[in-house]
Amino acid sequence: MPRMHPVLPEAVRQRLESTGLPLPAFGLLVQPVGAALAHAAAPLLALHAELSFQMASTAKLVTALAALDLLGPDHRWLTHARLLGTLREGRLLGDLIIVGGGDPSLRTARLQAWLSELHAQGLHEVWGDIVLDGRAFDLHESDHALTPPLSPDQPGYVRPEALMLDAGVLRVALQAGAAAARVVVHPRQAGLQVINRLAKTGPCHATAELERSAIDARLVVRGQWAADCGEREITQLALTHAELTTRAAAELWRAAGGRLKGRVRAVTAAAGADEMPPTAPWATLASPPLSQLVAVMNKVSDNLVARTLFLSLAEGFPQRAATLAAARARAAAWLRMRGLGEADVALDNGAGLSHAERCRPRALAQLLLHAWHGAHAKAFFASLPVAGLDGTLWRRMTEGPARGRAHLKTGSGIETRSLAGYVRCQSGRVQAFTAFVNHPQAADTVPALDAVVEWVVLNG
């Protein structure tokens, strides 16, 4: 694709300048998708298309396209149950190993239904331990150096793990009662002490805090919750796999009718767990297909799904544990196949959480043009938020010419706002659209970016 010279109509220039930000803070490239990839049409808009910008969540578009190409839209993540011991008359004389395969969509209801199936297949008692094997992802603290730290009050920063339940989030809700409010946690947590310090009078306001010690943890709920406050979820707490999934598994196994003589414990690659004897899967639980998870990722900008998809690109996964270095290497090789180098697109975790994830508007437009003509165009296009209708764009461009016509992934960071995808113009043409703003006041430019989208709809 040729280098892009500035193409900025006066109406667009004025709209950008009205933000008060310098023009070098903006990067734009809007180009017709055309009938043939080999003959890219001249751009409709181009500004600083060769400068490198922080991507924020538009990095998920690159992850989506790489995953669709390298893994395929029908790829599924598998969770296996392995029996380490002899199963006799419903009793497993050994350990039940639940081997995580990186499924980011595993939820309580689906896991409990699967455990009930294991019970129906004849596994009633586990005389050893239930071992949650998360060694399919080999991650270390240094891998997260450029991403925000895990924090209970930031569910969007949950780190990917090979065996994770409910996206690593503990939901805390309150139910008002005549005598006292009831605290409900989901998923239920074996061994977690809940301390209810709610007053029965006053405004409907409460907080929940997880207090950890060297021995155990307890959830302390404080505030006021009167009888007329009703039922409401008050918070979501981001927890590690060792906390949330391990405590939930014990409850789910009991709810499925199973008995456990041992305990539930987790093993991870980072902890240097000993090798387990290889055994064939006794049962397998499959995730939804990748195409569905790509739609979830892009529509609501799900960081955990993006980071899991990115890790899954690692060569040899899941037979070989995925490392972030291997995932980056394979993504970089895929970009080279598209004619792009590290200076064009740089990825760190695939979700846009890192300031190191950058691209040139021209490079992302090149990927969008190729995707439009690619084998997975339908699945990719369907995953994009639609202006004024759904996803992260449902509140934007709700009136006017762009509503229902702009299919764009959003991105936002402390100093970043971005949009990328496709715009169906009133002329009938489709434009590949990329727009970036990198500036401490980037958040103030959202109306201007939306106005540029509307200009493209009318003039493209």
Image (tube, rainbow, N blue to C red):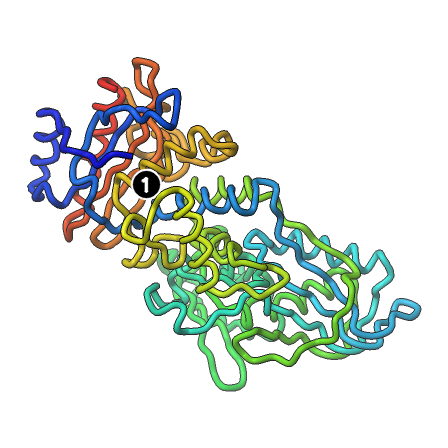
Q: Residue furthest bottom?
A: 214
Q: Tell me the kind of residue under disc 1.
A: Leu
User: Is the N terminus in the top left, top right, bottom left or bottom right quadrant?
Assistant: top left
Q: Check disc 1 and report the residue beneath it.
A: 364
User: At x 57% / y 58%, what residue is drawn?
Assistant: 102
User: At x 14% / y 45%, what residue is drawn?
Assistant: 25
**Residue 279 relative to residue 319: left or right:** right
Q: Nearer the viewer, residue 390 or 14?
A: 14
Q: Residue furthest right?
A: 89
Question: Percent from the top left, x then y, of residue 395?
Answer: 32, 34
Question: Percent from the top left, x then y, of residue 283?
Answer: 77, 57
Question: Percent from the top left, x then y, of residue 80?
Answer: 71, 60
**Residue 121 relative to residue 335: left or right:** right
User: At x 23% / y 32%, what residue is drawn?
Assistant: 450
User: Is the C terminus in the top left, top right, bottom left or bottom right quadrant?
Assistant: top left
**Residue 260 relative to residue 237: left or right:** right
Visible residue check, residue 302:
yes
User: At x 30% / y 15%, what residue is drawn?
Assistant: 426
**Residue 371 relative to residue 316: left or right:** left
